[in-house]
Image: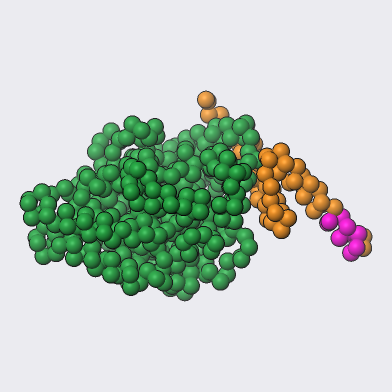
Chain colours: A green, B orange
């Protein structure tokens, strides 16, 4: 797979930093210049933290000269969705309701990256408070797709997908409650991991749905995601969902998957329950045939309907989101954009009993997914169902319909990876999705690497 | 049935839907501008359908606890 955008993989940059053929200051300066030059049309950054980035980069170069090495992310620039707290740096979630909000502490993921010596390049634009968009009335203009700026990026981690696709950073952090990492990764032609629930702490992430929010990682390559995951995976007693796998993961370089593998395909999710476009269906079939020719065992499977996952997910997510924002929506509705206000309002009509029913159904759906994953190593399915929509085709007065299959993995907590699989006739990226067993996130990266080798 | 009679029935259905949504809004203590009522009423109908599906499937669930 060839990318028009994007720089070199993190592993190559890391090696050059240690050899002394490159400095962190040089790559940081070049990244800032590229952003200043090209992000005027893409608008992926809400804020470029130029001084902070150069200070981080100088510190990394000094550490290398002194023989101190903090690991693969040391001296590497990254950027983060503007819903993660950054001490002393504005964190506004693209919302007037949070204008000039400056946190006094860092989010857990920022702390981890500080300790790893990574370079914070800036805060990335997003849909308001990780909800819905694009909404042209918000403080940040909608992010535009680097492959063609007439098209949307998807969201809510819009800036994270676009910044990686544009080559401003090799890796960015986003959040994913119903596909908010995998959607923009899909539309922008990059990789997006929604890890196993609890693997990365959400401390300092502005919440939307406390049982469905996940930290996610978007990378130009699967290796870049693995490098970032190696820093971020850690237990945090403050996030009660936090848990660690029984064996260490993302602690060594990953190789493409080799060996037998059983792939389950819930084709009904993207051909009957919902309709993926013909180009996406064709490219998923091509990927499946390629894997089968290489020895994978492919089997069509039946999961509960996509409607069941979506209905259950929306009842839980909207109920939790409304409960979180209810007071401010009543007292200061004018501070919220029209799309977020409309999106969150149905949460007011969900009763406690409905919410508890949805939690009960969630257990059943999770057990069904676990049952299928006993017999299959990974599930391969659709992520986005169409190429990115064009801005001029979006309805001017209502929430745009963005078709993607994000709910199953955030509802059940299983890891899911958006994988680019080719391009549409309009030369827009297309994507599919791999899901795996809980704590088996590495395998998804390895299968994606295998596919890269094969296709 | 004439076209006019059809339209009348259609508008009564619309009125009933509107009243039901306005009642729900009132109970929730929320307000929506007149121009956006139809949009919000569509979302209301959608979440009611989703709640119905969740209730049905949860009632069939054999998962304990």
Residue drawn at (45%, 64%), measured in percent from left and top?
A143
Which residue is located at x 70 percent, y 54 percent? B33
Residue A241 in which image quadrant: top left
* Spot occupied by residue A12 in the image (x, y as percentages of width and height): 18, 61
As for residue A63 lying within the magenta part, the answer is: no
Q: Residue at x 8, y 55 (%)?
A: A65
Magenta-tinted stretch: B3-11
Pick whichever, A60 or A15, lies toward us: A60
Is residue A91 in view?
yes
Residue farthest toward the left in the current orientation of the protein: A66
Residue sitting at x 59%, y 52%:
A334
Image vertical order of residue A146 relative to residue A347, above or below: below
Is residue B10 shown in magenta?
A: yes
Q: Image quadrant for the N terminus of chain A?
A: bottom left
Q: Main secondary structure of the magenta part?
A: helix
Q: Nearer the viewer, residue A336 or A219?
A: A336
Whether residue A11 is visible to the viewer of this picture, yes or no, is no
Residue A307 in picture, x, y percent from top left = 58, 47
Q: Give the residue at the far top of this rendering.
A: B65
How many marks the image carries: the answer is: 0
């Amino acid at each position: 797979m060839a990318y028009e955008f994007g720089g070199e993989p993190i592993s190559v940059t890391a090696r050059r930093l240690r050899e002394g053929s490159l400095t962190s200051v040089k790559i940081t300066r070049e990244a800032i210049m590229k952003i200043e030059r090209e992000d005027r049309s893409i608008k992926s950054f809400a804020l470029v933290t130029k001084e902070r980035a150069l200070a981080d980069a100088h510190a990394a170069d000094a550490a290398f000269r002194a023989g101190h090495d903090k690991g693969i992310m040391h001296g590497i620039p990254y950027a983060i969705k503007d819903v993660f707290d950054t001490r002393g740096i504005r964190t506004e979630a693209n919302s007037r309701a949070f204008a000039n909000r400056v946190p006094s502490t860092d989010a857990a993921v920022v702390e981890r990256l500080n300790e790893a010596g990574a370079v914070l390049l800036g805060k990335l634009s997003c849909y308001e408070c990780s909800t819905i968009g694009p909404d042209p009335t918000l403080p940040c203009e909608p992010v535009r797709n680097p492959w063609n700026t007439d098209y949307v990026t998807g969201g809510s981690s819009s800036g994270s997908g676009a910044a990686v696709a544009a080559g401003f950073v090799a890796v960015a952090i986003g959040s994913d409650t119903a596909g908010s990492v995998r959607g923009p990764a899909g539309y922008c032609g990059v990789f997006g991991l929604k890890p196993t629930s609890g693997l990365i702490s959400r401390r300092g992430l502005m919440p939307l749905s406390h049982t469905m929010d996940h930290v996610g990682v978007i990378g130009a390559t699967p290796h870049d995601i693995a490098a970032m995951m190696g820093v971020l995976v850690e237990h945090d007693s403050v996030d009660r969902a936090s848990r660690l796998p029984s064996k260490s993961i993302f602690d060594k370089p990953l190789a493409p998957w080799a060996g037998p593998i059983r792939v389950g395909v819930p084709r009904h999710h993207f051909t009957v329950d919902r309709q993926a476009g013909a180009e996406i269906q064709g490219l998923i079939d091509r990927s499946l045939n390629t894997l089968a020719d290489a020895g994978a065992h492919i089997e069509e499977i039946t999961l509960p309907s996509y409607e069941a996952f979506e209905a259950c997910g929306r009842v839980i997510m909207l109920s939790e989101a409304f409960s979180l924002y209810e007071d401010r929506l009543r007292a200061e509705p004018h501070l919220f954009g029209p799309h977020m206000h409309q999106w969150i309002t149905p949460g007011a009509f969900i009763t406690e009993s409905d919410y508890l029913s949805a939690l009960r159904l969630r257990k059943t759906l999770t057990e069904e997914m676990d049952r299928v994953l006993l017999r299959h190593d990974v599930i391969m399915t659709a992520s986005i169902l169409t190429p990115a929509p064009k801005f001029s085709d979006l309805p001017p007065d209502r929430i745009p319909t963005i078709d993607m299959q994000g709910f199953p993995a955030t509802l059940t907590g299983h890891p899911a990876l958006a994988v680019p699989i080719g391009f549409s006739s309009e030369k827009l990226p297309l994507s599919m999705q791999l899901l795996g067993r809980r704590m088996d996130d590495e395998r998804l990266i390895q299968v994606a690497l295998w596919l890269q080798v094969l296709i | 049935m004439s076209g006019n009679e059809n339209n009348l029935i259609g508008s009564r259905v619309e009125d009933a839907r509107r009243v039901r949504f306005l009642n729900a809004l009132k109970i929730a203590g929320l307000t929506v501008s007149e121009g956006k009522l139809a949009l919000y009423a569509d979302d209301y109908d959608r979440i009611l359908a989703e709640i119905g599906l969740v209730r049905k499937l949860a009632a069939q669930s054999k998962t304990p606890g």
